[in-house]
Image (cartoon, rainbow, N blue to C red):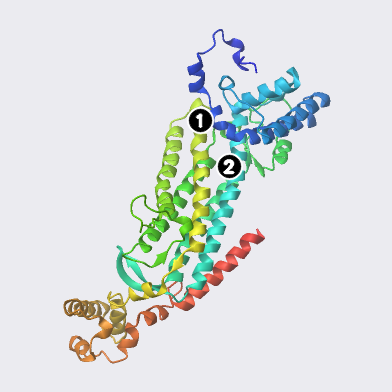
Amino acid sequence: MSTHKLWGGRFEKQPEHWVDEFGASIFFDQLMAAEDLEGSLAHVKMLKHTKILPANEADQIIAGLQTLQEKLAANELEFTVENEDIHMNLEALLTKEIGPVAGKLHTARSRNDQVATDLHLYLKKRLKTVITCITELQSALLAKAELHQETLMPGYTHLQHAQPISYGHYLMAYWQMLKRDRERFCFNLKHTDISPLGAAALAGTTFPIDREYSANELDFSELYANSLDAVSDRDFALEFLSNASILMVHLSRFCEELILWCSYEFGYIELSDQYSTGSSIMPQKKNPDMAELIRGKSGRIFGDLMGLLTVLKGLPLAYNKDMQEDKEGVFDAVKTIIPCLKICTGMVETLTVKDDKMAHALDNDFSNATELADYLAKQGIPFRKAHEIAGKLVLTGIKEHQNLQDMPLESLQQAETTIKDDVYAALSPKNAVLRRNSYGATGFEQVKQQIAQAKQIMANYKDN
C-alpha cells in the first residue's frame, strides 16, 4: 500500500515513523470502519444523483466500496499507521482496488464532516443496543419485584434500620432510576440522529450537493443547519458519556447493595454461582466479583466524561486536532456499559431472596418506632411530642433488651395513657408496610399499582 500522504502536496518532508504513530488514530478509529464505508457509499450515491460525478465513475466507486465492505466483514483489510486514520486508510485501499478514480470520492467532502458522520453513525447504532439492554434489566427487576411484593425487609437511611418496606418496593426504586436512564438515552438518540455530511471542512461547498439525499441514505432524521456547528459539535458524545455516567452511578449503587445483602452479616440474598468467584486460598469464599467489577468500572466512565469535557472546553470553532481525542472515551463507554447492564440483568434474574432472613432482621430493630409516633399523633398528640414519647420508649427497650411490640401494655401506658391494646397491631412490621398507602409508598397495594404502571410503560416501549 502506498504511504504517500493523501494531503501531502504542499509538504517537502515526511515525518519520522514515531511522529506518524503519535498523530495517528487508526489504532482506535478503525472501530468505525463499517460506518466510514456506509458514509462514503451515501456520499458517492449523492454525487451520482446530483450529477457531480458521471454515473460510470460513481458506479466504479460504489462497486469498490462494496468490495471493501465484503473484505471488512471477512476481516481481510489491513490498515497502516502511515495512512493515519480510518478515512485515509479506506481511501488508500479503495485506490488500490479501483485505481485513481477513487480520488473523486472526496469531492465536496472533508475529513471533518466525514469523521463527524462516522461518529454519529457509530453512536446511533450503539445507543439502540444500550436502550435495549436497559429495557431488559428493567424487565428483570419488574419480574423479581412482582414475586416479592409482600416480602418484608428493613428500609435504610444512613445504612441504619429506618422503617419496614417491601422488597418489591425496593426493586421498583431501581426500575424507576432505569426508566429515567432510558429516557435520557432516547433523548440522546435524537441529538445523534442528525447528519453533518455535506458541511465539508467548516463552510459548506460550492458543489451542488443534496444533503437531504445523503441523510436519507444514512437514515438520519435531520440535517445540521449550520456547517460550523456540524463539524465542531460533540454534544451528542458528551450527552452519551454523561448519561452513561449517571447510569453507572445507578448500577454501582445497586451492586453495592447486592454486595452488602449477600454478605454473612446481612444474608438477605445469594448470588448465583454464575456471577460469583472463589478464593485461591480460602475454600469457603463466594465472592460477588461481578458486582464489584461493575462498581469499579463506574470510575472509568466518569473519567471518559471528564476527559471529553476537558478536551472540548477551550476549543475555537471549527475542527481542531484535539477532537481526535473524542472517540476513545466513547468507544470505552460503549464497551463497558453494555456488558455491565447484561451482567446486572443476569444477577437479578438468578439471585435467591432469603425472605425469612429479611423478615427476621425486623424483629428487634425498633424500625416500628415511627408507627408508634404515628399512632400517638392519631390520638391527637402533637407529632413532636409523640416523637419524644416513642424515642423514650425505644431507649427503655434498648436498655431492657425488649422490642416495642413485646413491651407490656402497662409499660407503654406509663409513657402515655392514651395508648390502648390496638397499638400492637400498629407495631407489626407487616401492618406497618401494609398501611402505607400514600401514592408511591411501600404499601402492598401501592407496590402492586407501581408494577401495573411499569408494565404499561414497558408495553409502550414495544409499541414505540
* Residue at point 20%, 91% (across, down): 410
In this view, which residue lies farthest toward the right? 56
Counting from the top left corner in percent of width and height, residue 237 is at: 52, 40
Horizontal side of 314 relative to 404 (left or right) equals right
Whole-percent x, y for residue 284 in the image: 35, 59
Give the percent coordinates (x, y) of residue 351: 47, 64
Q: Quadrant of the C terminus?
A: bottom right
Does residue 359 appear anywhere in the picture? yes
Circle 2: element type: helix
Where residue 132 sits, quadrant-wise, is bottom right
366 or 273: nearer the viewer: 273
- Which residue is label 1 attached to? 323
Answer with left or right where residue 156 lies relative to residue 172: left
| Image height of 101 relative to 9, above or below | below
Q: Secondary structure at mark 1?
A: helix
Indicate left or right for 378 with 194 as reference.
Answer: left
The Cα atoms of the two marked residues, 2 and 1, are separated by: 16 Å
User: In the drawing, what numbered circle is on residue 123?
Assistant: 2
Q: Residue furthest top?
A: 12
- Name the residue: 35% across, 79% down: 429
Quadrant in which residue 381 is drawn: bottom left
Q: What type is the residue that disc 1 sits on? A: Met
Q: Nearer the viewer, residue 379 or 253?
A: 253
Q: Nearer the viewer, residue 297 or 239?
A: 297
* Residue type indicated by callout 2: Leu
